[in-house]
Amino acid sequence: MSNYRIKTIDPEMRALQIIKYGEIKDSLAVNEVTIPAVQAKDVLIEVKAAAINPIDKSIILGNLQGFLPIPLPSTSAYDVSGVVVGKGKEVMDFAIGDLVYSRVPQEQMGTIAEYVAVTSGAVSKKPGNISFEEAASLPLAGLTALQSLEVAGIKEHDKVLIHAGSGGVGSFAIQYAKAKGAYVYTTTSTTNVSWVKDLGADRVIDYKTEDYKTIVKDADIVFDTLGNNYTAEAFQVIKKGGIVVSVIGAMDEETAKLFGMADYKLPEDLAKAKSDKEATYKYVFMHPNGEHLGQIKSLVEDDKIKPVIDKVYPFSDSVEAFTHLASGRAKGKIVIKIA
């Protein structure tokens, strides 16, 4: 717990909201809105920093309307760090003044704001050795990487291919896999080779000058963060009986059933590639989890994971931050400092 002094909270707050779907500069506005109500299991967080992710951009552009419908206007983003300033009557694990971080659930989306209410099960104390901005950069990318590699059963001496090593998920996944004792291949562009190597990757493959399929052989795990052809190609470099885990490719049949798609079948090319290698294919849909964030906290405090931030923007430049995200040129995470 910090030395936070309880203050009077104004019922209104500033929030960056999606006011319509479309181009980023036309679709976002800072509005005055009511502070969210705190339910019995919630904590109210005074937001210090929020990070933005590709999913946030896709929501603004309207690409996910069928999958993640939201009322308009809606406050944007999911990653947050800050200070607990209120809590519901059933919350026992957090106290007023605790410094925390979270990837908030879909129904509580809206972290680019002065306050956000979050179910306490999705919250963890933030790592004590990093800033609020660094802590905000971790939740979505960290949970995606951790949950995916744990589904894959990562263990010491595994050979793991992680695509897009300079991105938010990839840069975390490299560090997590190395913390587990794995041998890591990763792909990136020429300009990022050196700093991706510094993250701990054993073999950095410059996709502009090298073909990863001729370099990676008999991998135990392929972590697919790119989708499209990369999902099927993963089976070319996986060992017999290996596992391909994806966060952007086709759903596997078990996951599809969870979404009510009872008649879903894996696309024919993936089904054949999977069968030929006697491999496992798993689609991972990241879920908020405070316990997993607690594991990440320990790894950060043990210096096994370091946040990778591209740039921190002030709240007033939030739209510019999204424009930078949309450029696809960020190395690591883009963070917005709220307070």
Image: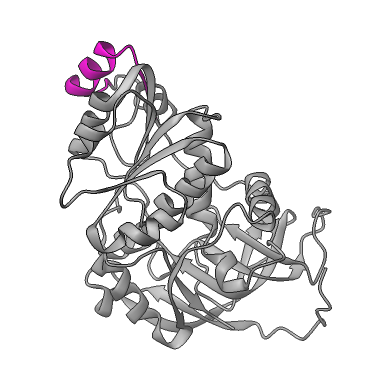
Q: Position of residue 247 (x, y in %)?
A: 37, 40
Magenta residues (range): 265-282
Q: Is residue 142 magenta?
A: no
Q: Position of residue 14 (x, y in %)?
A: 52, 83
Q: Position of residue 56 (x, y in %)?
A: 37, 62
Q: What residue lies at 60% left-to-right and 58% top-to-bottom?
A: 102
Q: In front here: 336 or 203?
A: 203
Q: What residue lies at 27% left-to-right and 20% top-to-bottom?
A: 265
The quarter holding residue 55 reads bottom left
Q: In front here: 175 or 107?
A: 175
The quarter holding residue 124 reads bottom right
Quadrant that contains the N terminus: bottom right
Q: What residue lies at 31% left-to-right and 61% top-to-bottom?
A: 192
Figure check: 61 above or below 270: below
Figure check: 291 above or below 319: above
Figure check: 278 above or below 258: above
The quarter holding residue 127 reads bottom right
Q: What residue lies at 52% left-to-right and 70% top-to-bottom?
A: 50
Is any part of residue 21 visible from this angle? no
Q: In front here: 41 or 229?
A: 229
| Left or right: 195 as drawn, with respect to 147 | left
Q: Is residue 274 magenta?
A: yes
Quadrant that contains the C terminus: bottom right
Is any part of residue 138 visible from this angle? yes
| Left or right: 219 as drawn, with respect to 115 | left
